[in-house]
Amino acid sequence: MKCRGGKYRGPENARRIKAFVLLLRHSGLRIGDAVTLERRRITGDKLFLYTAKTGTAVYVPLRYDVLIALEAAPKINEQYFFWSDESKPESASGDWQRVLKGVFKEAKIPDGHAHRFRDTFAVGLLQAGVAMDRVSALLGHSSIKVTEKHYSP
């Protein structure tokens, strides 16, 4: 992806974007939670977090390629993977939304948005036989009814 400004360019920017996309795809995190993900939340191959929307504590196993991509991404902050802590989280999330818009455009995916990664994560778990209540907890939904409404079909 072409860099249109910012601190990182070329391969460094590509590594950051790849790590961010893989994290979104394989963690089920909302974009705001991914942007403000603290490094200390990953121990071994497990991501421990409280989702911002519900405060639910969950462990999400991360694939090896996600862990490698996170390690390879340029460090912009000692505490966070994708946030400098120099702006509001909402502003940083907006920046990442714009980056992803460019990724989807280059990939020729019309109407692409960050939530598609979360949907793919949830559907993959359900297709693998993970119970609806567990998927609901991993997504940080306030009720299993929310998960059933969106993913039962």
Image (tube, helix red, strand yellow):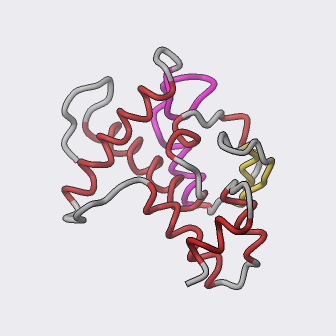
Residue 51's spot in the image, x, y percent? 69, 45
Q: Residue at x 57, y 33 (%)?
A: 36
- Left or right of 135 in this view: 124: left
Q: Quadrant of the C terminus?
A: bottom right
Residue 132 versus residue 80: which sits nearer the camera?
A: 132
Q: Percent x, y for residue 85?
A: 53, 19
Count of numbered tags = 0
Q: Name the outermost residue toward the right.
A: 57
Q: Residue 94 location in percent, x, y?
A: 38, 34
Magenta span includes 68:
yes
Q: Judge by depth and name the residue closer to the eye, 85 or 116.
A: 116
**Residue visible at 22% across and 27% down in the picture:** 5
Q: In the image, what residue occupies the spot 49% across and 56% down?
A: 22
Image quarter of residue 130: bottom right
In-image side of 55 versus 4 (left or right): right
Locate residue 53, reporting x and y percent: 66, 43
**Magenta stretch prevailing secondary structure:** loop
Determine the residue located farthest toward the top in the rendered image: 86
- Position of residue 61 in the picture relative to residue 123 (left or right): right
Q: Quadrant of residue 66?
A: bottom right
Q: Residue at x 60, y 23 (%)?
A: 78
Q: Is residue 67 magenta?
A: yes
Above or below residue 113? Residue 80 is: above
Q: Which residues are magenta?
A: 65-84
Residue 134: image quadrant is: bottom right
| Residue 55 higher or lower than 125, as above or below | above
Task: Say which of 135 and 65 sits in front.
Answer: 135
